[in-house]
Amino acid sequence: MAKTSSIQRNEKRKRLAKQFAARRAKLHAAALNESLPLEERFAARLKLAQLPRNSSPTRIRNRCALTGRPRGNYRKLQLSRIALRDLASKGQIPGMVKASW
């Protein structure tokens, strides 16, 4: 089980990324728009830099939904490899069986 503070920090990042998504996208588009004057694009970059760092979606870490483990996650299931194997062994994931040969 991951530290509760790490899980909460990641949840805060998700919340902030969702909250600032529209503003960030608008500023990013303005910064990359070649038809705008250089000063306006630079001003958009400065405003973008003033937004909270944790509002950037690249700072969000994929974590296991059950344990909060940050590594070895399956994106589709949002589970770590360890939690997935445990649930599959218990037969709690439909259609998934542990291999044996």
Image: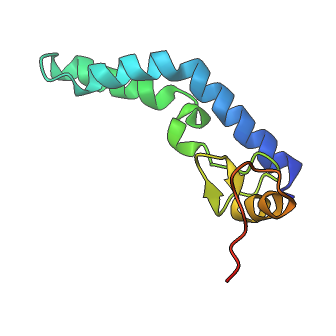
Q: Which image quadrant: the N terminus?
A: bottom right
Snapshot quadrant of residue 2: bottom right
Relative to 70, say whether 14 is above or below.
above
Left or right, 17 with reference to 80: left
**Residue 13 horizontal/vertical position (percent):** 66, 35
Query: Which residue is drawn at the image coordinates 57% and 44% (left, top)?
Result: 59
83, above or below 60, in the image: below
Could you tell me how many numbered marks the image carries?
0
Q: Residue at x 12, y 17 (%)?
A: 35
Q: Nearer the viewer, residue 36 or 76?
A: 76
Tell which residue pokes out farthest to the bottom in this image: 101
Q: Residue at x 64, y 27 (%)?
A: 16
**Colouring mode (rainbow / by chain / secondary structure / one colour):** rainbow
As drawn, is 31 to the left or to the right of 46? left
Q: Is residue 77 left or right of residue 22?
A: right
Against 87, residue 26 (above or below) is above
Taking the view exactly as shown, the residue that stands out farthest to the front is 101
Q: Percent position (x, y) of residue 63?
A: 69, 50
